[in-house]
């Protein structure tokens, strides 16, 4: 804008000087004086009252300069009248031009203010919609909590009955070692469900994790053993890739087991027959922020994180779904086949361990969900 004003001012000055020269050369031709309208209109576009006053005075003064030239006898009075008319025209043009430009300036300012207000209203509306969604999610979570507590109370008795029959099956003389292995898994999971129900009935909040240092295999193996029959039945390959020298992991075995089962269930649902799901366990160095935060959970941790990545070759997720994956009640499954709470609760559980849970996915190229938990290098045995 400043450069544009300087250019306009230069053009106006040049036109003004040209008219003054023409007036000097041909003072009797009053038409040249009307040309002072051009610099006045150019200055008007700069929307400066002080500059406009200066320009009008200069143009009016230059108009009357023509009277200084000698004229024929009896023509001086007519020249004064003609040049006064020109001066009046110049003043009127300056007033109209300046008024028009100031009105345009006010309209532009009003448009900018309206655009800003509209943007502010849109932001406020967006925040209101987000707050409403959060309130709705909170209400739905509260309703689900009440429903779960009611259901937990009702299913407790039949679960105990099932547990008794499972124990009886294990004592049957005809039970083979493979059958006993399956029965043991069923019994462990029934006991796990009973403990979850007891947690739900004893408190409206989930039981806080009670982590300790343990081997990663102790956390991974029960989940993969539980899910292996479901993978086999669908024709999906389940692989476990455990790196050598992985640190001990800070985990509540039962809580992390629930997270892994949920992730494996999601991976199985997203993977077609003949696909594969890989559970890859490894380690990485912590960032300074992770180390500082992690030592509030386990002061003796090493500067390492244990990573458990569940990678599937399934359908993947579009970017829009990835952004919403951890929102409560968001699910891509059919109605009745998913609550939309699995990833949300899984991330909350991992965060309660001092770790993190992240998701990477691309439509048509599978999904990888990575759990990062605090790690600790085991102490070497003492040399006697």
Image (cartoon, grey):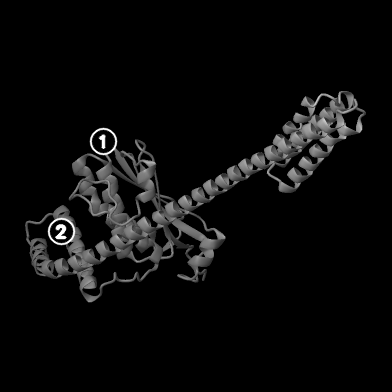
The residue at which mark 2 appears reads as 183
Q: Secondary structure at mark 2?
A: helix
Q: Is residue 143 above or below residue 95?
A: below
The image quadrant of residue 185 is bottom left
* The one of 329 and 151 positioned closer to us in this rendering: 329
**Residue located farthest toward the right when viewing the structure as drawn:** 70
* The one of 24 and 158 positioned closer to us in this rendering: 24
Residue 373 location, x and y as percent? 43, 60
Residue 27 location, x and y as percent? 86, 26
Q: Quadrant of the N terminus?
A: top right
* The one of 67 and 94 positioned closer to us in this rendering: 67
Callout in the foreground (1, 2):
1
Instruction: Say if mark 1 contacts mark 2, CB within 8 Å.
Output: no
Whether residue 155 is visible to the viewer of this picture, yes or no, is yes
User: Residue at image x 81%, y 32%?
Assistant: 16
Q: Earlier in the sequence, mark 1 or mark 2?
A: 2
* The one of 204 and 158 positioned closer to us in this rendering: 204
Residue 260 location, x and y as percent? 31, 55
Q: Which mark is residue 274?
A: 1
**Residue located farthest toward the front when viewing the structure as drawn:** 74
Position of 191 with respect to 115 (left or right) is left
Whether residue 357 is visible to the viewer of this picture, yes or no, is no
User: Residue at image x 29%, y 46%?
Assistant: 267
Q: Is residue 78 above or below residue 204?
A: above
Position of 104 with respect to 208 (left or right) is right
Badge 2, how many Cα within 10 Å: few under 14, some, many 20+?
some
Q: Is residue 132 above or below residue 49?
A: below
Q: CA distance from mark 1 to mark 2?
A: 28 Å
User: Residue at image x 76%, y 41%?
Assistant: 56
Q: Which mark is residue 173?
A: none
The image quadrant of residue 143 is bottom left
Q: Secondary structure at mark 1?
A: loop
């Amino acid at each position: 804008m400043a450069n544009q004003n300087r250019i306009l001012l230069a053009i106006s000055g040049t036109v003004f000087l040209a008219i003054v020269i023409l007036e000097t050369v041909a003072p009797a031709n009053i038409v040249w004086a009307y040309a002072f309208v051009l610099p006045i209109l150019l200055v008007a576009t700069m929307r400066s009252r002080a500059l406009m006053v200066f320009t009008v005075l200069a143009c009016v003064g230059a108009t009357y300069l023509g009277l200084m030239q000698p004229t024929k006898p009896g023509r001086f009075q007519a020249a004064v009248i003609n040049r006064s008319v020109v001066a009046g025209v110049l003043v009127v043009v300056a007033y109209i031009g300046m008024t028009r430009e100031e009105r345009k300036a006010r309209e532009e300012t009003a448009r900018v203010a309206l655009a800003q207000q509209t943007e502010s209203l849109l932001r406020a509306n967006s925040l209101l919609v987000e707050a409403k969604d959060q309130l709705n999610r909170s209400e739905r979570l509260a309703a689900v909590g009440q429903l779960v507590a009611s259901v937990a109370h009702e299913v407790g008795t039949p679960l105990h009955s099932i547990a008794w029959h499972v124990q009886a099956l294990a004592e049957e003389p005809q039970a083979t070692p493979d059958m006993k292995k399956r029965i043991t898994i069923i019994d462990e999971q029934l006991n796990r469900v009973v403990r979850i129900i007891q947690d739900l009935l004893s408190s409206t909040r989930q039981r806080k994790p009670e982590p300790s240092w343990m081997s990663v295999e102790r956390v991974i193996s029960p989940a993969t053993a539980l899910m292996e029959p479901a993978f086999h039945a669908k024709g999906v390959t389940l692989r476990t890739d455990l790196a050598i020298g992985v640190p001990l992991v800070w985990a509540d075995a039962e809580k992390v087991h629930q997270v892994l089962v949920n992730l494996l269930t999601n991976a199985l649902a997203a993977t077609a027959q003949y696909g594969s799901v890989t559970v890859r366990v490894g380690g990485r160095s912590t960032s300074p922020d992770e180390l500082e935060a992690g030592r509030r959970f386990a002061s003796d941790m090493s500067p390492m994180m244990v990573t458990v990545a569940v990678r599937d070759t399934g359908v993947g997720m579009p970017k829009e779904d990835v952004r919403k994956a951890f929102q409560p009640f968001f699910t891509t499954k059919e109605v009745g086949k998913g609550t939309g709470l699995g990833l949300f609760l899984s991330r909350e559980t991992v965060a309660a361990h001092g770790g993190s849970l992240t998701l990477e996915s691309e439509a048509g190229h599978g999904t990888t969900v990575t759990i990062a938990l605090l790690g600790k290098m085991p102490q070497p045995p003492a040399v006697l």
